[in-house]
């Protein structure tokens, strides 16, 4: 692999769901889980100052990788006559600075909430970051596409960032940074509706071809998932709502396990 192969968006629009639930997906899932427990154990054994240093470096890496990828998108937009993917965009574009996807929002909000110690937002941001990270493990369309064994910058960013979105909140929860309670479901509900509203702003007013948070078009049709793929656009949101509820329920129970070990 050359440097040119790494700094490219080639393949991002090529059969993004081809590897879903296949051997590459299983390998990615197992590597993610194994890496998580290894790194978590190592970080847990560190002194608190070293843990803080690791967390800060990880948060900085999230931001650097996010905007480095945006630089790549902008570079390709201005330098290539024919775009390699539909992710390329000009500099004067809201996507350069912000995101309307759930994980993209957490890329920016998680560092802010941790660095400025914004306690009221921590339950929502921590749980949502974990959910967003795990969602990509189970639906890895931003990781497995094109040639999955040929890693490029967008792939590398997605792999590392979503790993940190799961790891960092669980490390902080485990050491007692916050205590997640059932009453946090109120702030969680407000938070998810706020993020969904933000995604709809992007869908309706910024880019009418976008499908932020999969609220406009049924993603199960693209993935060719039986039954779920037959649900008309719009009505699929009810299925997404049920899946999000189940997702938060699973994340909440995962968090409880890590809190008990704190």
Image (cartoon, helix red, strand yellow):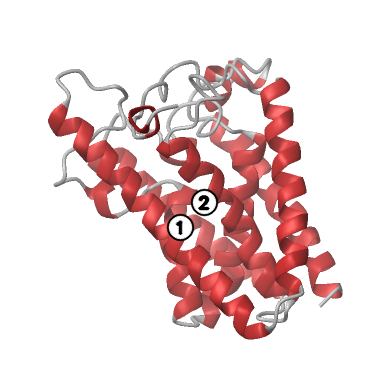
Q: Which residue is mark 1?
A: 62
User: At which x and y percent is residue 125?
Assistant: 55, 65
For the residues bearing labels 1 and 2, Cβ distance under 8 angstroms:
yes
Q: Would you say residue 21 is visible in this rendering?
A: no
User: What is the crowding at mark 1: few (fewer than 14 residues within 10 Å), some, or many (at least 20)?
Assistant: many
Q: Compared to 250, does 117 lie above or below?
A: below
Viewer-proximal residue, 14 or 98? 14
From this view, report whether residue 227 is shown above or below residue 237. Answer: above
Residue 115 x/y as whole percent: 46, 78
Q: Quadrant of residue 53?
A: bottom right
Kindly state the secondary structure of the residue where label 1 is placed: helix
**What kind of element bears circle 2?**
helix
Whichever of callouts 1 and 2 sits on the residue coming sooner in the sequence is 1
Q: Residue at x 48, y 19 (%)?
A: 146
**Quadrant of the image for the C terminus?**
bottom right
Which label belongs to residue 161? 2
Q: Nearer the viewer, residue 179 or 36?
A: 36
**In the rendered view, would you say 158 is above or below 226?**
below
Q: Position of residue 118 (x, y in %)?
A: 49, 81
Which residue sits at x=64%, y=56%? 166
Question: 213 or 26: which is nearer to us?
Answer: 26
Q: Nearer the viewer, residue 20 or 201?
A: 20
């Amino acid at each position: 692999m050359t440097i040119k192969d790494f700094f490219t968006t080639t393949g991002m629009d090529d059969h993004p769901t081809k590897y879903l639930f296949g051997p590459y997906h299983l390998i990615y899932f197992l590597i993610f889980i194994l890496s998580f427990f290894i790194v978590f154990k190592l970080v847990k054994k560190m002194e608190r100052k070293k843990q803080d240093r690791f967390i800060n470096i990880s948060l900085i890496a999230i931001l650097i990788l996010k905007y480095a990828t945006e630089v790549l998108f902008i570079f390709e937009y201005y330098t290539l006559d024919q775009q390699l993917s539909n992710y390329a965009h000009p500099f004067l574009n809201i996507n350069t600075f912000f995101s309307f996807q759930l994980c993209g929002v957490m890329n920016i909000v998680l560092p802010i909430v941790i660095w400025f110690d914004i306690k009221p937002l921590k339950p929502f941001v921590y749980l949502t970051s974990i959910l967003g990270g795990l969602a990509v493990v189970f639906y890895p369309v931003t990781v497995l596409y094109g040639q999955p064994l040929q890693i490029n910058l967008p792939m590398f960013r997605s792999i590392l960032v979503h790993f940190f979105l799961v790891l960092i909140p669980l490390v902080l929860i485990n050491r007692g940074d916050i205590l997640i309670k059932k009453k946090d479901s109120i702030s969680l509900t407000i938070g998810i509706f706020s993020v969904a509203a933000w995604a709809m702003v992007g869908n309706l007013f910024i880019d009418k071809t976008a499908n932020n948070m999969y609220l406009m078009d049924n993603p199960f049709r693209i993935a060719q998932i039986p039954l779920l793929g037959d649900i008309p656009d719009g009505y699929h949101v009810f299925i997404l709502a049920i899946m999000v509820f189940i997702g938060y329920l699973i994340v909440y129970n995962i968090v409880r396990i890590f809190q008990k070990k704190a």
